[in-house]
Amino acid sequence: MLRVEGLQKSFDGFMAVSSADLRVGKGEIVAVIGPNGAGKTTLFRLITGEHLPDKGRVIFKDEEITGLPPHEICRKGIGISFQIVNIFQRMTVFDNVQVAVLAHQRKTGKLFSPARALAVEETEKILRNVGLIEKTRSVSGSLSHGDQKVLEIAIALGSNPDLLILDEPTAGMAREETSAAIDLIHRMTDELGLTILFCEHDMDLVFSIAGRIMVMHQGKSIIEASPDEVRSNKQVQEAYLGVS
Ligand SMILES: Nc1ncnc2c1ncn2[C@@H]1O[C@H](COP(=O)(O)OP(=O)(O)OP(=O)(O)O)[C@@H](O)[C@H]1O
Ligand SMILES: [Mg+2]
C-alpha cells in the first residue's frame, strides 16, 4: 500500500531524515520506533505532504505521491493524527468530526444538498466506532487528554482514509486510556479494514500490536523486520532498546 524509498529532508543544513525506507502492506499495523529526534515525525510529514522531501520517493497504492500538497494526499486516502493534539477546543466533539467529514465530501465533490444529513450519519458512525458517541455534545476542550487524542483519530477518520498514520497515539494517556486505544487500533484494522502506521515510545504497546517494526536512528531507517527480529537485533539494542 505504501512504499517509501530513500527519503531525505534537511532543515537549514540539519539532516532530520537522511535516508528512510519503509513498506506498509494493506491491513498491516506497522510501527516506527527510535529515540527522540530520530526523525519519525518528519518522516510522517514527508509522507503526508506537509514537508517536501529533498530526495526520495513516496508511492501510495502504486502511484507516486512525492511532493503533492497535503489535501491531495489526504484525498488519495492517507489520514494522520498528530503528536500534538490539534482540535478545535471550543467546538463540540460532534462538530470537530463533522467539519472533517464535510471537508472531505466537498473535496471529493460529494457535497450535494442532502450532504449535511449524510455527514451527520457518517459523523455519528465514526464517533460510535471510536467510542466517543456518549460525548458528542461535549465541548472538545473539556475532554480528558486521552479522549482528545481519540477525537484526533476520529477527525482523521473523517476523510475516510485507507492508511491512517498515528504520531504517538497514546502519549500522555492513563493506563486504561492506553488499553482502550490499543483496542481501537485493533478494531480499526479488523473491522474498518484500515492500514495503520504509527510511532510510539511505549515499547510494551509497540511490541504488543505492531506486525512489523521499522527502527529509525539519527534520520536513517536501520532495520525493518518482525518484532522478534527487531528485539534481538544487536544494532537496535545498541542504538535504542539498550538505552531506554
Ligand atoms: N521544522 C523543523 N525545522 C528545523 N528542525 C526540525 C524541524 N522539524 C524537525 N526538526 C529536527 O529534526 C530532528 C528530527 O525531528 P523529529 O520531530 O522528526 O523527531 P522524532 O523522531 O519525531 O522525535 P520525538 O520522538 O521526540 O517526537 C530533530 O532534531 C528536530 O529538532
Ligand atoms: Mg515526533
Image: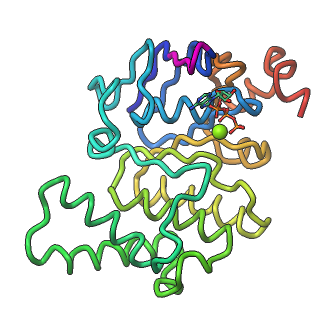
> With respect to residue 107, does 131 lie above or below?
below
Q: Quadrant of residue 227?
A: top right
Where is residue 237 shown, x and y percent of the image? 85, 22
On the image, the x and y values in percent for residue 4 come to 45, 22
**Residue in front for this viewpoint, 108 or 242:** 108
Instruction: Say which quarter of the image contains residue 120.
Output: bottom left
Horizontally, residue 32 falls left or right of residue 23, namely right
Query: Can you name the residue that lies furthest to the right here?
Result: 243
- In the rendered image, the quadrant that contains the N terminus is top left
> Which quadrant, please, contains the C terminus?
top right
Provide residue 136's location: percent of width, then percent of height: 47, 83
Compared across the picture, whether 9 is left or right of 84 comes to left
Q: Residue at x 33, y 25 (%)?
A: 67
Residue 209, percent across and down? 66, 47
Residue at image location 59% in from the left, 13% down from the top? 13
Rendering colour mode: rainbow
Q: In front here: 195 or 21? A: 21
Magenta-drawn stretch contains 74: no
Q: Which residues are magenta?
A: 8-13
Q: Is 179 situated above or below 108?
A: below
